[in-house]
């Protein structure tokens, strides 16, 4: 885990190049919290699956170990966080949408933490210039970390946030939604994936899926406040 300092940032489509659901741009204050240095890996998730008797997710033939776990729903991610909390006596959870964007921006206001151009071999996407582009996930930590010391906040796999999706920001981005009794409440994914064009990898970009959605391009990372 990496400790992210408290701070205040502009959240949303600062450059005006995004979608309507990235508005309004607004200031958000974030308290200090810790966040996973990388996405949760297969090695980490498989230990949980073995200990709890849960079915292991498919790796699509790309390999397990240090690659980010994929084919996991938000329900799966939440179950992992609950188990890890019990094992460590520390309270883990998925990040709120505001925590995620704050950590991904790492004090910047550009499209990506390194600037406004995707460049080459800085991330894994369709057009990022890496050996894994649009083919398979990259092992965790294959690219340089952002200024907060976080890896792969840009590309590789989408990451679940615990906030309820809203068409326009109204404050829900700063809180975790309750676990639904059904999958009608949409949740947020952030960061883009190996299959997406660079525009989807912008720090402000948002995606929405149901609580039980699983896909080879979706994983997660955890955070905690203590």
Image: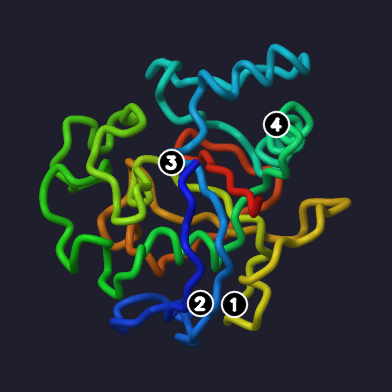
Within 10 Å of disc 2 (Cα), the crowding (few <14, some 14-19, many 20+) is: some
Query: Colour scheme in the image?
Result: rainbow
Q: Quadrant of residue 31?
A: bottom right
Q: Quadrant of residue 131?
A: top left
Is 139 situated above or below 96? above
Within 10 Å of disc 1 (Cα), the crowding (few <14, some 14-19, many 20+) is: few
**Disc on res. 141:** none
Is 19 situated above or below 92? below
Disc 1 secondary structure class: loop
> How far apart are labels 4 and 3 at the CA level?
16 Å
**Disc on res. 37:** 3
Residue at mark 1: 167
Residue at mark 4: 84
The reply, left or right, for residue 74 in relation to residue 113 is right
Could you tell me if the residues under marks 1 and 4 are in contact, i.e. CB atoms within 8 Å? no
Residue at mark 2: 21
> How far apart are labels 1 and 4 at the CA level?
32 Å
The earlier-in-sequence mark between 2 and 3 is 2
> How far apart are labels 2 and 3 at the CA level?
28 Å
The earlier-in-sequence mark between 3 and 1 is 3
Could you tell me if the residues under marks 4 and 3 are in contact, i.e. CB atoms within 8 Å? no
> How far apart are labels 1 and 2 at the CA level?
5 Å
Could you tell me if the residues under marks 1 and 2 are in contact, i.e. CB atoms within 8 Å? yes
The reply, left or right, for residue 104 in relation to residue 164 is left
Q: Which is more foreground, mark 1 or mark 4?
A: 4
Q: Whole-percent x and y of residue 221?
A: 53, 42
Q: Residue at x 74, y 26 (%)?
A: 87
Looking at the picture, tell me which residue is in the foreground, 5 or 27: 5
Q: Whole-percent x and y of residue 171?
A: 66, 79
């Amino acid at each position: 885990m990496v400790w992210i300092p408290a701070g205040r940032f502009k959240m949303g489509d600062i450059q005006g190049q995004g979608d309507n659901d990235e508005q309004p741009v607004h200031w958000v204050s974030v308290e200090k919290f810790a966040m996973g240095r990388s996405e949760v890996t297969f090695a980490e998730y498989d230990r949980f699956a073995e200990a709890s008797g849960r079915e292991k997710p498919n790796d699509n033939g790309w390999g397990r170990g240090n690659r980010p776990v994929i084919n996991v729903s938000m329900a799966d991610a939440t179950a992992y966080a609950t188990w890890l909390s019990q094992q460590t006596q520390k309270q883990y959870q998925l990040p709120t949408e505001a925590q995620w964007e704050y950590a991904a921006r790492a004090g910047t206001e550009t499209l990506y933490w390194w600037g406004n151009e995707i460049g080459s071999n800085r991330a894994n996407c369709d057009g990022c210039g890496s050996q894994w582009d649009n083919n398979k996930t990259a092992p965790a930590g294959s690219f340089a970390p952002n200024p907060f010391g976080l890896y792969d906040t840009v590309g590789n796999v989408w990451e679940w946030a615990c906030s309820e999706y809203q068409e326009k920001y109204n404050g829900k981005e700063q809180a975790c939604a309750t676990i639904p009794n059904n999958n009608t409440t949409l949740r947020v994914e952030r960061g883009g994936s190996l299959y997406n064009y660079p525009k989807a990898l912008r720090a402000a970009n948002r995606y929405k899926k149901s609580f039980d959605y699983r896909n080879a391009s979706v994983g997660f990372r955890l955070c905690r406040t203590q």
